[in-house]
């Protein structure tokens, strides 16, 4: 614990709160970035001051895909265990977003209420994680994956991984790493570190792709050798080994087996190694049952209300992160079965007897996995796809040519295309053999067209890049009376209605 807030910190909180009020009154957003930017200018050590008040420390969650959902699930586990999570649930994950979260939560005197029972669950942008690590001083760091994303901002995935390795090598405080060992770029960051590691991954060859995706973003081992795979689950995630040295995929302590993908839920067997302290004492209504495991593992049959293999990875990451924090396994299991989606990530809305499901896709691998989800969606398939090229999306949209749009060829879907780069997206779909029904630049009008094309009782699937997702979700919130994303301090309901 650090000393109490000083004059600068107290003034920064007041300034940040005033900025948030102005932003929201002017309807310029949720005030999840500017308040932290201004507060940080006034009090440069604001983040350190607040991080030191967290009585139960903090966990960081980073990676290309799945940060918001994984942090959402860990926060639900923390809450189920009786603690009070403090999370940047809006997904604002740069330094200014973390500072804004603290400003929003603090009293006018610059203190966190109930600080002794607080545990920080902090989603961090993969590029800023190295700089924020020594400032936040977390107890646990969860690393999800590394995929090509916003190359105009991040550079290649190798440079991001190198930044992680350097930060870990320079960090001197105790830290437990929860690593996705199916991703060789992530698994290798543990090389040479004395930190405790809990690995997670999928052990189910039946969940593998029939063929490897061409949008693979990890091709070379640290030694320079090429990776070979016995199974590929998504992108470059799978059962891998180096063709030159003896480096192989580590054995995970938290695994998923017998994976069964559904249209709206996913079932799998969650297994935890006996090397991890994870006593499971199921309570009534936990939504999971223990099964026998001769190896001494604890295995639980689990159903989560989220679709897609990437949801399995997010769930495994949440389990590994929660176990590293000392959260009881039964609390995490209850959270996984009850938490539902994070905002804009499979969130559902009911409008005039139609269900709208919102899916985020911002890079080739992520879009491929969304298409895999859509192949299991109810028919007829009505799809609204939106592509923007804002700073938060990445201004180079050529990545859509590395996504397998061809997965939807022959599906007979009704396709409406929108967004700032609607014409580019429409052309890509046409080249894949999926002809748009209509191209409409206005997202609001496109939503009207798509809803009109959706039969009563049917479902509209909306796939959008980040800024387009925010715009569509704001429109859906207005139409249904749902909370705006920055207003959500509790888990979102799976479905909200008008």
Image: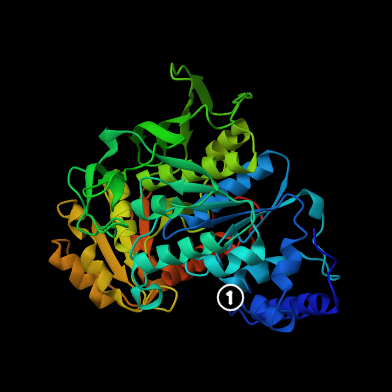
Residue drawn at (32%, 33%) of the image: 204
- Locate residue 259: give its quadrant: top left
Q: Position of residue 436 (x, y in %)?
A: 21, 66
Report helix, strand or loop for mark 1.
loop
**Whether residue 28 is situated above or below residue 483 in the rendered picture:** below
Instruction: Work out whether residue 30 or residue 204 is closer to the camera in this orientation and state it.
Output: 204
**Residue 175: in sight, yes or no?**
yes
Query: Quick check: 60 above or below 238?
Result: below
Q: Nearer the viewer, residue 173 or 39?
A: 173
What colouring method underlies this structural image?
rainbow
Q: Which residue does the image show at 65% across and 52% down from the upper left?
A: 490
Q: Residues within 10 Å of mark 1 (few under 14, many from 20)?
A: some
Q: Position of residue 492 (x, y in %)?
A: 58, 51
Residue 351 visible:
no
Does residue 273 appear left or right of residue 36 in this picture?
left
Per the image, the residue denoted by label 1 is 29
- The quarter in which the C terminus is drawn is bottom right
> Quarter of the image containing the N terminus?
bottom right
Please tell me which residue lies in front, 290 or 61. 61
- Residue at the spot 85% in from the left edge and 74% down from the top edge: 6
Relative vertical location of residue 228 with respect to residue 285 in this rendering, above or below: below
Expressed as whole percent of the image width and height from the top left, the position of residue 398 reads: 25, 74
Residue 222, percent from left and from top: 32, 57
């Amino acid at each position: 614990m650090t000393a109490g807030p000083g004059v600068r910190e107290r003034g920064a909180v007041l300034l940040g709160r005033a900025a948030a009020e102005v932003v929201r009154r002017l309807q310029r957003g949720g005030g999840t970035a500017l308040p932290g930017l201004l507060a940080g200018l006034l009090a440069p050590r604001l983040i350190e001051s607040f991080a030191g008040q967290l009585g139960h420390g903090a966990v960081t969650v980073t990676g290309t895909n799945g940060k918001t959902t994984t942090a959402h699930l860990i926060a639900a586990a923390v809450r189920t265990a009786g603690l009070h999570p403090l999370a940047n649930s809006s997904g604002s994950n740069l330094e200014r977003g973390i500072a804004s979260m603290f400003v929003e939560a603090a009293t006018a005197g610059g203190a966190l209420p109930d600080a002794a029972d607080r545990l920080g669950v902090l989603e961090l942008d993969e590029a800023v994680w190295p700089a924020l690590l020594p400032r936040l001083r977390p107890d646990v760091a969860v690393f999800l994956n590394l995929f090509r994303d916003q190359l105009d901002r991040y550079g290649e995935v190798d440079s991001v991984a190198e930044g992680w390795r350097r930060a870990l090598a320079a960090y001197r405080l105790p830290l437990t790493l929860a690593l996705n060992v199916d991703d060789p770029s992530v698994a290798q960051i543990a090389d040479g570190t004395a930190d405790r590691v809990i690995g997670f991954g999928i052990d189910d060859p039946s969940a593998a792709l029939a063929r490897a995706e061409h949008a693979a973003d990890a091709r070379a081992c640290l030694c320079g050798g090429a990776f070979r795979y016995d199974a590929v689950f998504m992108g470059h995630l799978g059962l891998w080994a180096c063709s030159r040295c003896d480096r192989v995929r580590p054995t995970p302590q938290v695994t998923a087996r017998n994976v069964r993908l559904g249209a709206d839920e996913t079932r799998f067997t969650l297994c935890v190694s006996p090397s991890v302290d994870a006593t499971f004492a199921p309570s009534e209504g936990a939504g999971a049952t223990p099964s026998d495991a001769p190896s001494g593992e604890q295995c639980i049959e689990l159903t989560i209300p989220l679709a897609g293999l990437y949801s399995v990875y997010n769930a495994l990451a949440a389990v590994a992160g929660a176990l590293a924090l000392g959260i009881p396994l039964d609390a995490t299991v209850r959270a996984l079965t009850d938490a539902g989606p994070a905002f804009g990530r499979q969130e559902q809305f009911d409008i005039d007897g139609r269900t709208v499901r919102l899916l985020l896709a911002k890079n080739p691998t992520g879009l491929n996995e969304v298409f895999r989800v859509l192949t299991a969606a109810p028919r007829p398939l009505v799809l609204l796809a939106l592509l923007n090229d804002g700073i938060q999306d990445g201004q180079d949209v050529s990545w859509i040519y590395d996504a397998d749009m061809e997965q939807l060829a022959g599906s007979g879907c009704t396709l409406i295309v929108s967004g700032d780069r609607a014409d580019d997206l429409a052309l890509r779909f046409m080249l894949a053999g999926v002809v748009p029904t209509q191209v409409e630049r206005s997202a609001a009008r496109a939503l009207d067209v798509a809803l009109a094309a959706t039969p009563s009782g049917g479902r509209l699937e909306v796939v959008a890049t980040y800024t387009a997702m925010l715009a569509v979700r704001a429109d859906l919130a207005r139409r249904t009376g749902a909370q705006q994303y920055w207003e959500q301090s509790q888990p979102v309901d799976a479905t909200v209605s008008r």
